[in-house]
């Protein structure tokens, strides 16, 4: 599936999701799908199957709400220190889709580069610091600052109030289809879906948005 190249003459602001867009979602899939259940099982003397059976319904029940993205919430539920656990495995944090070249090109073009994430501040700080990325971004926004996830219109209103931008001349890339739908409904002019958020998985077919295998494929600007 080819990447539809954006018309960069019509784009002033670049807003990027973190996990699955700039960074490899393989980290998060490993963390939540293997490491947390294993440590939960170890701490409670359960089998891995028992741990999955206890945890899965709790994850499903609040998917796409703010607590789902909240390390404090899951630390309470699991009894594990998830901030510490993320720090322990931080060397697994990695880029995906030639994103460093894309970040560099956006910076070089002089366009404001914003990180717009649902990740809890504990999580984004560990990841950006691991890769030395913090200084790349002109604005870093976690939906936890606004009390609503990116899936919700309230998030976009709060973002606009805090950091005004011309939505029709903004590009926003994300790997979550519900988030992309909310961005489009808000009026973001250029919405791009990531087909391959996890390097260990094959790309997905996405029909409803312009899409790409990696941010590097949106170059040259
Ligand atoms: Mg994401």
Image (cartoon, rainbow, N blue to C red):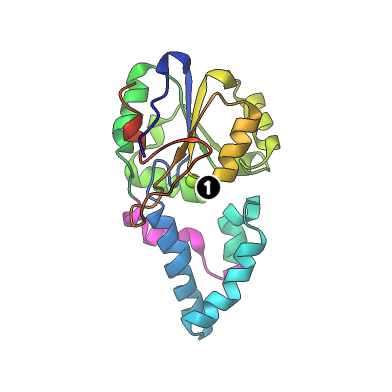
Q: What percent of the width, then of the height, locates residue 45?
A: 50, 86
- Quadrant position of residue 107: top left
Q: Is residue 80 magenta?
A: yes
Q: Is mark 1 within 8 Å of ligand 1?
A: no
Q: Does residue 180 sit above or below 123 in this rendering?
A: above
Most common secondary structure along the magenta stretch: helix
Q: Position of residue 53 (x, y in %)?
A: 57, 77
Badge 1: few (under 14), some or many (20 or more) residues near its Cα, within 10 Å?
Answer: many
Count of residue discs: 1
Q: Is residue 78 visible?
A: yes
Quarter holding the C terminus is top left
**Quadrant showing the N terminus:** top left
Is 30 above or below relative to 199? below
Residue 126 vs residue 99, the one in the foreground? 99
Q: Is residue 163 left or right of residue 10?
A: right
Q: Which residue is mark 1?
A: 119
Question: Which one is nearer the viewer's eye here, 99 or 206?
Answer: 206
Q: Residue at x 37, y 33 (%)?
A: 3
Q: Position of residue 199 (x, y in %)?
A: 33, 52
Q: Nearer the viewer, residue 152 or 121?
A: 152
| Residue 165: percent from left, percent from top | 58, 20
**What residue range appears in magenta?**
77-93
SS at circle 1: loop
Q: Residue at x 62, y 51 (%)?
A: 64
Q: Would you place residue 99 above or below residue 28 in this image?
A: above
Q: Residue furthest top?
A: 9
């Amino acid at each position: 599936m080819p990447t539809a190249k954006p018309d960069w003459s019509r784009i002033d602001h670049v807003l990027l999701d973190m996990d699955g867009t700039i960074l490899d979602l393989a980290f998060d899939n490993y963390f939540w799908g293997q490491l947390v259940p294993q440590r939960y099982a170890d701490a409670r003397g359960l089998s891995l199957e028992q741990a999955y059976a206890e945890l899965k319904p709790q994850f499903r029940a609040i998917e796409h709400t703010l607590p789902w993205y909240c390390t404090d919430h899951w630390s309470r539920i699991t009894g594990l220190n998830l901030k510490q656990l993320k720090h322990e495995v931080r060397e697994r944090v990695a880029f995906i889709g030639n994103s460093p070249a894309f970040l560099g090109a956006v910076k070089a073009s002089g366009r404001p580069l914003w990180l717009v994430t649902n990740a809890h501040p504990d999580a984004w700080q560990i990841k950006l610091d691991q890769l030395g990325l913090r200084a790349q971004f002109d604005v870093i926004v976690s939906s936890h600052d606004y009390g609503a996830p990116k899936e919700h219109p309230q998030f976009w209103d709060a973002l606009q109030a805090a950091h005004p931008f011309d939505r029709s001349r903004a590009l926003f890339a994300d790997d979550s289809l519900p988030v992309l739908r909310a961005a489009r409904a808000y009026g973001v002019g250029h919405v791009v879906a990531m087909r391959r958020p996890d390097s260990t998985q094959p790309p997905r077919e996405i029909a409803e948005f312009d899409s790409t295998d990696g941010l590097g494929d949106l170059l040259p600007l």
